[in-house]
Amino acid sequence: MKTSMAGQWAVWLAAWTAATAMWAAPAEAPAAPARVLIIGDSMMKLPAHAIELALAGRAGVTTRAYTSIGTGLARLDSFDWMEKTRTLQQEFNPDITLVCFGTNDRQPMQTADRIVKVEDAEWEQEYARRVGALMDLIIARPAARILWLELPDMRDEKIQADVLLINRLVQEEAAKRPPVEFFGTRAILGHRPGKFTPYVIGTKGLPVQVRDPDGMHLNRAGADRLAEHIVKAIYGTATDAGTSQGR
């Protein structure tokens, strides 16, 4: 009887050990994306090209980019990013979508029954709803992921205040959705988040200009620098994103 009980205990212990090992095992990392879609407004135009160049030599990876200057999620009556994104998702079937919007978006928004003005209390709620709706549209497909880029610091104080608000709303919506990652850019494109600077210290220890003279957009070196960090975040290794020196 003692031998029989000891044998049963051994079986139960082995089963319990196997079960706890399974529970403790970390979740599998998502597969490296083979199809990368890049969308956004003018802030994404140069970075999209840099990301495509950075991924051009990566085996098994296909990219597609669509950017539109002067558009965003505020004036869907002028350019419907919801419908355009839906079309791109159906045509391209991406594993991950890189997104950047917001520099043009602090303006009135047309809803079904009214125009929501910037000064209205409902403005933040409506913009957050649109951000969330776009996220949900993209991640509705199985295993789909989003890397939504933080807007960098701006030279103009008014624009800076606007992008900080947009960043907060996007980050809050991303936090509600595990397949969405809010990708920080301000530390990559400046010395200290919250303070605009056109230069960063490059890999050779020399200052490198990363911002356009307009105080908003990235220049070629800035786009290459951002692309390098994005590729590393997605794949774990960097790929040469261009020819800019010292980034």
Image (spheres, rainbow, N blue to C red):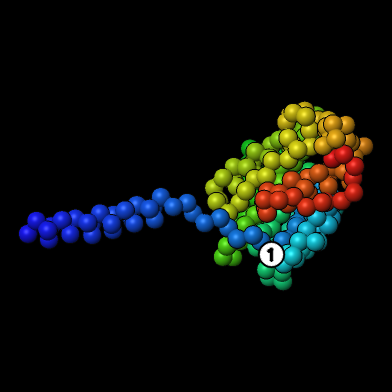
Q: Nearer the viewer, residue 40 or 18?
A: 18
Badge count? 1
The 10 Å Cα crowd at callout 1, few under 14, some 14 to 19, many 20 or more, is some
Determine whether 163 is above or below 15 in the image.
above
Query: Residue 119 sits in which quadrant?
Result: top right
Secondary structure, mark 1, is loop
Determine whether 37 is above or below 108 in the image.
below
**Residue 244 image offset from top left, x and y in percent:** 90, 45
Q: Residue sitting at 38 percent across and 53 percent down?
A: 21
Q: Nearer the viewer, residue 71 or 77?
A: 71
Residue under circle 1? 34
Three-letter amino acid code at disc 1?
Answer: Ala
**Residue 108 image offset from top left, x and y in percent:** 74, 45
Extreme right residue here?
213
Q: Residue sitting at 69 percent across and 37 percent down?
A: 165
Q: Nearer the viewer, residue 128 or 177?
A: 177
**Residue 151 image offset from top left, x and y in percent:** 74, 41
Q: Residue sitting at 73 percent across and 35 percent down?
A: 187
